[in-house]
Image (spheres, rainbow, N blue to C red):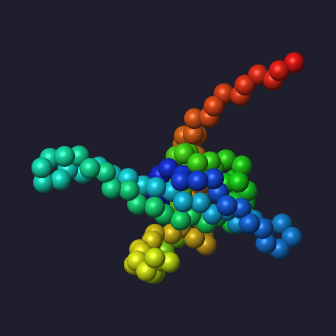
Amino acid sequence: MLLGNVGQDPEINTFGESGKIAKFSIATSYNFKDKEGNTLQKTSWHKVTAFSKLAEVAEKLVKKGASVYVEGRIEYQQYVNKDGLDVNSTDLIDTLDKLDIFKYPKTKPEEPEES
């Protein structure tokens, strides 16, 4: 289970005749105090992959800046990125069971059309 903010609009791919996959990342953050008493924030990024019906929901409703709650199988991965740095990632994949939108991002109001 993760509750976080979406980093970018989902990337949507199709497979077969009507299957969909939605991939997006969410950030989770927490605050803590350092030795000097300063409040600092730690943010972690998590990749989320949704299939079929939840992918369709993500395509329509998940947008950059939205606060979302996701449930699914968590997988931890370690790899070396293109810059040669070791990376640890937490991914929700395969069996995303639940996707709820708690807060939609603020959008600019539509401007009236000129007549």
View extreme (top): residue? 115
Q: How many marks?
A: 0
In the image, 93 versus 77, the foreground residue is 77
Q: Is 7 located above or below residue 76 in the figure?
A: above
In the image, 23 versus 80, the foreground residue is 80
Whether residue 77 appears in this view of the structure is: no
Report the residue at 57% width, 70% height from top. Answer: 93
Q: Quadrant of the C terminus?
A: top right
User: Dividing the picture into quarters, in which one does residue 94 lie?
Assistant: bottom right
Residue 31 percent across, percent down from the top left: 29, 49
View extreme (front): residue? 83
For residue 44, side relative to residue 17 (left or right):
left
For residue 12, side relative to residue 18 (left or right):
left
Report the residue at 43% width, 80% height from top. Answer: 84
View extreme (left): residue? 36
Report the residue at 46% width, 69% height from top. Answer: 90
Q: Is 45 located above or below residue 4 in the figure?
A: below
Residue 92 percent across, percent down from the top left: 53, 67
For residue 69, side relative to residue 114 (left or right):
left
User: Dividing the picture into quarters, in which one does residue 87 lie?
Assistant: bottom left
Residue 69 percent across, percent down from the top left: 52, 52
Residue 89 percent across, percent down from the top left: 45, 71
Report the residue at 63% width, 63% height from top. Answer: 23
In the image, 111 versus 76, the foreground residue is 111
Whether residue 88 appears in this view of the structure is: yes
